[in-house]
Image (cartoon, rainbow, N blue to C red):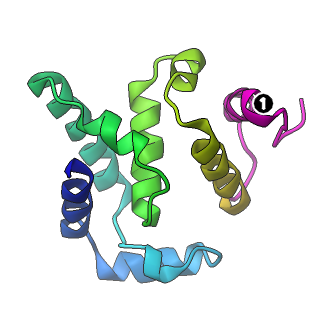
Amino acid sequence: MECEAITRHLHTLADASYKAFNARLIPNVAPETMIGIRLPRLRSYAKELLQSDEDNGTHVVKDFLGTLPHALFEENMLHAMLLSLAAHSTDEACGMRPWPCFSRMLRTSCVWMAGPTTKAFRRLVNHVVSPTNGSRIFGP
């Protein structure tokens, strides 16, 4: 129920011109899965969701993180932002399950990511994926 409210709110943040721009930047993501939300707006919405959960004692973020796979590109981006904001360490991030879907999302994210990745990101991805099935996305 709360996940549907999050998706509805994401649609209110949409920007059609940014959707077209974003679709050209990331050609291997289907444009119909994109809404077109600028990252600063998405970041502030992620912070707002976390603050709302803390203030009201609700579990909207936990429910959203547990609902995988997401249908929209921006939902995946929001998911990653919420994980980044909510987890204070790699071990804490690894406590946020279910891993089979999350590791699949990480692999997908690594496919479309452009440019070099940071060592910290590589450590996180390898730490997350390795316990699941023993595979590694990046080398040591």
Q: Secondary structure at mark 1?
A: helix
Q: Nearer the viewer, residue 89 or 40?
A: 89
Image quadrant assignment for residue 53: top left
Highlighted magenta segment, given as a residue range:
114-140
The extreme left residue here reads 56
Q: Which residue is found at the position 42% from the left and 66% from the top?
A: 72
Residue 48: image location, x then y, percent = 20, 39
Q: Nearer the viewer, residue 106 or 15?
A: 106
Image quadrant assignment for residue 87: top left
Image quadrant assignment for residue 131: top right
Q: Please state the total of marks drawn on the protein image.
A: 1
Report the side of 45 relative to 65 (left or right).
Answer: left
Query: Looking at the picture, which amino acid does disc 1 mark?
Result: Ser
Q: Which residue is found at the position 66% from the left and 57% from the top?
A: 108
Residue 30: image location, x then y, percent = 55, 79
Up-down relation of residue 103 to residue 70 (above or below): above
Report the side of 27 relative to 115 (left or right).
Answer: left
Up-down relation of residue 63 to residue 58 (above or below): below
Q: Which residue is found at the position 40% from the left and 48% from the top?
A: 67
Residue 15: image location, x then y, percent = 28, 75
Classify the position of the C terminus by image quarter. Answer: top right
Report the side of 108 relative to 76 (left or right).
Answer: right
Q: Which residue is found at the position 25% from the left and 47% from the top?
A: 45
Residue 28: image location, x then y, percent = 65, 75
Residue 102 part of the magenta segment: no
- Count residues near mark 1 (Cα–Cα under 10 Å), then give few for <14, some for 14-19, many for 20+: some
The extreme right residue here reads 139
Report the side of 125 relative to 78 (left or right).
Answer: right
Question: Which residue is the site of mark 1?
Answer: 130
